[in-house]
Amino acid sequence: MNRLRTGLLLGALTGLLMFIGGYFGGNNGMVIAFVFAAIMNLGSYWFSDKIVLAMYKAREATEREAPDLHRIVRNLVQRAGIPMPRVFIMPGEAPNAFATGRNERHAVIAVTEGILNLLDQNELEGVLAHELTHIKNRDILIGSIAATLAGAIMLLANMARWAAIFGVGNRDDREGGGLLGIVATAVLAPIAAMLIQMAISRSREYLADEGGAKIAGTPYGLAGALEKLGRASKMRPLAVSPSTAHLFIVNPLSGRSLMNLFSTHPPIEKRIARLKAMRP
């Protein structure tokens, strides 16, 4: 059921991209948008980890450079029964983490310098176990493809905004609505993309919390980490693209009040309450 639901949601993102292409280019634009979406899906399958890691200037951390981090991840993957992922560190003091890659054998876990400075070992274990659950549940490919498609939709929406500013798009009303249609596309397309991302991501965060608690052996480390991360993200939000916000363990845009309306994450308070209600 989860795979079917996710497939439908990713199909909705592709359909939204095709709608925008069709609006600006008619049937030819729709075909081009479909081909573009197919290429992006294929490209994000093979290169999603490289794309996201490059966006946030993450560098691979060797065992010699980060022995404690590697030790924790190695212990957790043994409990989870999955291969050892590559470990990356992102620069910056904003605390956060994410996992990406196309499958268990080509997975990556990335953490910020800030999260390593903020959390104690038990809390860091909880966060890393949460990300390993995303890998085990094969959420990472879905999230990366959604990020790529949503990014493309937002790029087209930005182009539509510029078209509206410079007066492009004086098409006959019967063929698309002219300037009003461009403005509507510019405003509604990114909102629709974020709503679809929310539907993909929110339920998976609860499942990853539960699975992470089981891998770590206790729910309290992750619960404590979420409390700290929730406070820190409000004071020091991570500068990220909204199209990739759903990849992170806590919403990196939570310091921006408007983004709370379209959060890809469940409320941290509910996540913590669910964790604390679990039996250790």
Image (cartoon, rainbow, N blue to C red):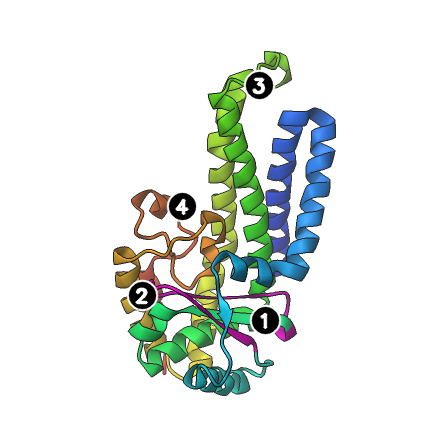
Tell me if 252 is positioned left or right of 192 in this view: left
Question: Which badge, 3 or 2, comes first in the chain's sequence?
Answer: 3
Q: Secondary structure at mark 1?
A: strand
Mark 4 or mark 3, which has the lower sequence index? 3
User: Would residue 1 be seen by someone viewing this image from the given angle?
Assistant: no
**Label 2 near label 1: C-beta < 8 Å?**
no
For disc 4, the marked residue is 262
Mark 3 lies on residue: 169
Tell me the distance, in whole angstroms, between the alpha carbons under discs 1 and 2: 23 Å
- Residue 88 shown in magenta: yes
Q: Residue at x 31, y 59 (%)?
A: 233
Of tags 4 and 3, the one toward the viewer is 3
Please state the extent of the stretch shown in magenta in the rendering: 85-105
> In which image quadrant can residue 175 be found?
top right
Label 4 packing within 10 angstroms: few (<14), some (14-19), many (20+): some
User: What amino acid type is highlighted by mark number 4?
Assistant: Phe
How crowded pointer 3 is (Cα within 10 Å; few <14, some 14-19, many 20+) is rated as some
Q: Position of residue 133 (x, y in %)?
A: 51, 73
Estimate the spatial distance between the alpha carbons at disc 4 and disc 2, rounded to whole Å.
19 Å
Q: Quadrant of residue 21?
A: top right
Q: Nearer the viewer, residue 93 or 216?
A: 93
The amino acid type of the residue labelled 2 equals Leu
- Residues at marks 3 and 2 touching, judged by CB atoms closer than 8 Å: no
Residue with the mark numbered 2: 229
